[in-house]
Image (cartoon, coloured by chain):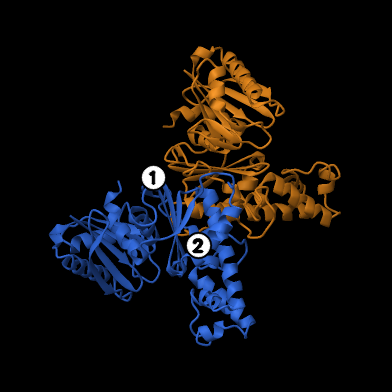
Chain colours: A orange, B blue
Amino acid sequence: MLHIGVDLGGTNIAVGAVDENNRIVGRGRLKTDPTLPAEALAEDMAKAVKLAVEDAGAALIDAADIGVAAPGSVDPATGIVSYANNLPFRNTPLAALLTGLLGGLPCRLENDANAAAYGESLAGAGPGAESFVMITLGTGVGGGVVLNGQIYGGFNHAGAELGHMIMVKDGEACTCGNRGCFEAYASATALARQTRAAMEQHPESQLWRLSDGGRRVNGRTAFDGMRAGDETAKAVVEAYLDYLACGLTSLVNIFQPNCIAIGGGICNEGETLLAPLRERVRAADYNKLLPQRTRLCAAALGNDAGIIGAAGLYRLP
Amino acid sequence: MLHIGVDLGGTNIAVGAVDENNRIVGRGRLKTDPTLPAEALAEDMAKAVKLAVEDAGAALIDAADIGVAAPGSVDPATGIVSYANNLPFRNTPLAALLTGLLGGLPCRLENDANAAAYGESLAGAGPGAESFVMITLGTGVGGGVVLNGQIYGGFNHAGAELGHMIMVKDGEACTCGNRGCFEAYASATALARQTRAAMEQHPESQLWRLSDGGRRVNGRTAFDGMRAGDETAKAVVEAYLDYLACGLTSLVNIFQPNCIAIGGGICNEGETLLAPLRERVRAADYNKLLPQRTRLCAAALGNDAGIIGAAGLYRLP
């Protein structure tokens, strides 16, 4: 049987038809139109599901169930999205809508960061880990925690907001309304902001040339500058690594997970990112003398983590 | 049957004979002599156990098992204390020693902060909570996490070091060797330090009179000064509440537990402490719109939490 995973993003509806071994055997994709009402957006999602099933050379009757990774406040118990920034969901019974549109196929929902962590725990960086933590460095810092094979969400399923640990009390303003959150220092957005601030102070930096005169500054710019030998860029990267290591150290001290996986585009830096992070976290964490330390690695599934995690939701009780 | 709980502290060995309903029905207590070798300290622990059993009007044969809450690095799986600051344990098989000294009584070990959290989850602030977090504000900030009735310790049982979340990157030095830990701002030790610093800046403060000219400054001094109407004391308490609320907000965002209980002497302040903390955390946490919010309360068992948690360890798988 196939299990359908839908990763609903602000830009794309990405669907995979996934087999019992967590392999994507068919794909469907449509643009997300955030101006549509919820029902019409669900219809687009159903269309993308059908494309994925067809791409797998199968029919809807070959699918056992569907899982959806959605942004925002999601209640897996009821299948309701109570709220999503930039999407037309307000207490929307998305699971029931999709079940109705897809011939009664059972549907489960999960928060997108949790689904990505679950996908990595099933088939990416974390299989076999009793405790697994994932952070995704993107526009924000997404967090997901999988303990004993279950997604951890707290009593109201709103937990694991790891990007909103406060790391610098009274520090940078965060999108959540608070100040000093991990996200405000360690997201790709934050790195771009830090890069821009350093460029303003250093008109001589090669970062200007590398970013088309400051027009294209993103989470990669400082790393590119460092590789080009630029001192300003190197200082930005070093400071960013310090911030990221600080949050990771807290996560090690709190969870002592077998593994922390880092996802998001910045992970493409590979060992340039990971090696200095490991060094910093190992020097700082609370249990320096323990023989067994948390493994720190890059996420393995890239953009497919959400699809595979969503498709795997049927495994949960 | 009785279950014996031993809370091994740096000052006292406190033992309770505990019934099936988590009630202490007999007590034993001896001074901890940290200059003794491990075997002799275990003998003192065994003596205190016998005192508690006698105090309950029972005999050792009426006891089913023994649980020990010990400071330091404790491995419940092996019953070994690998290291404890100020106590003579270095890879000491403490559980086996006690079993040998107490006629074969099965013995389990747990870290003291975890045992206190477990005790509160069984019979204090948290019964029925699916997810329960406890912090103890003392010399340091102890942390314990109980999820689905199990003590959470991570893959190496060294987790839940909640006092070592970093809250002020590059901030105050912490005893763990790092900087800016929650503990370095929210422990009773930290509050006393903050109080002393404010007194130095304010020679006119009533805090001088209240602390015997600065000779007795502790975690209560600033609260006493505030009650006496002293402005310096009020400012110290307000700043301390901000630090504490900052750490609690992170814990809510990370765990969304049903309940966070606060233990330690500072809790005797009751609603003077808790009411402003609740207000601050509710204004700051990530999920301000959720109908269900984490309950923030004082620990209920006082110094008995460790005994009751230790005695209850037999309930764990």
As measured in the structure, the alpha-carbon distance from the residue carrying label 2 to the one carrying label 1 is 26 Å
Pointer 1: what residue?
Answer: B148
Q: Which residue type does callout 1 highlight?
A: Asn
Q: Amino acid at mark 2?
A: Leu
Q: Quadrant of residue A136?
A: top right
- Mark 2, residues whose alpha carbon is within 10 Å: few (<14), some, or many (≥20)? some
Q: Quadrant of residue A82?
A: top right
Q: Say which residue appears at 59% left-offset and 16% top-offset.
A: A50
Residue A182 in view in this figure? yes
What x and y, as percent, mark residue A272? 65, 46
Point out the image quarter for the N terminus of chain B.
bottom left
Instruction: Choose between B248 and A191: the one closer to the eye.
Output: B248
Determine the chain carrying the residue at label 1.
B
Q: Circle 1: is it few (<14), some (14-19), or many (20+) Cα within 10 Å?
A: few
Query: In the displayed structure, would residue A35 be above or below residue B189?
Result: above
Residue ID at (30%, 75%) = B33
Q: Is residue A2 above or below residue A127?
A: above
Q: Residue B160 placed where, x, y %?
A: 45, 55
**A45 or A16: nearer the eye?**
A45
Q: Report helix, strand or loop for mark 2.
A: helix
Residue B24 x %, y %: 25, 62
Q: Position of residue A21 (x, y in %)?
A: 47, 25
| Residue underneath mark 2 | B274
- Image position of B157 (left or right of A66): left
